[in-house]
Image (spheres, helix red, strand yellow):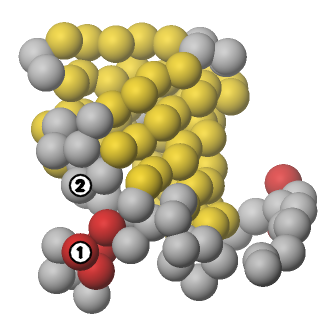
Amino acid sequence: MAKTLHFKKSAMSFAPFGHKGPGTAEIARLVGPDVSTSMGGGIARFDGCAVEWTVLYDEFICVLEERYKMKAGGEMFEGGPGDVFWIPAHTPLVYKGDKATVFYTVWPVDWRKRHGME
């Protein structure tokens, strides 16, 4: 049985991801296949950027700070702290934000392996 983990904000390590151009997109991947056999999750930050992606997993996003924006299915969504989004697998989207911080979780955790990306 896996043990309970505590991720302190002060110890999180953020790395750039999926973005070229103005602004920044950073992610702290906290739970991956090395920790869980079912779900993954972490914290992401978006500031003045647009990250295009098609999710290959179900994703759940909760806005923690500032304004988070997302274009999905031709519709623009915008949320603030406490707002939650659920995105089904295979949805093309664009993540955006202005100093936005979000918590995300994905299922399945091994989506990269399932799609031959490892």
Local SS, label 2: loop
> What SS does tag 1 mark?
helix
- What residue sits 59% from the left and 36% below the top? 102
Task: Decide: few, some or many residues near mark 1? Use Cα within 10 Å; few <14, some 14-19, many ≥20.
Answer: few
Q: Is residue 44 above or below residue 112?
A: above
Vertical order, 84 against 111 (above or below): above
User: On the picture, is 9 further left or further right than 96?
Assistant: right
The quadrant where residue 104 appears: top right
Q: What residue is shown at x 21% (from left), y 24% (from top)?
A: 72
The answer to which image quadrant residue 13 occupies is bottom right
In the rendered structure, which disc, 1 or 2, sits on the residue that comes first in sequence?
2
The amino acid beneath tag 1 is: Arg
Whether residue 26 can be seen here: yes
The mark found on residue 59 in the picture is none
What is the crowding at mark 2: few (fewer than 14 residues within 10 Å), some, or many (at least 20)? some
Pick whichever, 85 or 46, lies toward us.
Answer: 85
Look at 62% across and 50% down and name the residue there. 43
* Position of residue 26 measured from the top left corner of the image (x, y, whole percent): 51, 55
Q: Considering the image in quadrants, where does the N terminus appear?
A: bottom right
State the residue lying farthest toward the left.
74
Q: Which residue is mark 1?
A: 114
Do the residues under discs 1 and 2 have CB atoms within 8 angstroms? Answer: yes
Q: Is residue 12 above or below residue 47?
A: below
| Label disc, if present, on residue 56 of the rendered structure | 2
Q: Amino acid at mark 2?
A: Leu
Given the current orientation, which residue lies at the most extreme bottom position?
118
Label 1 and label 2: CA atoms lie apart by 9 Å
In the depicted view, which residue is nearer to us: 62 or 15?
Answer: 62
In the picture, measured across the screen, residue 26 lies left or right of residue 92, that is: right
Quadrant containing the C terminus is: bottom left
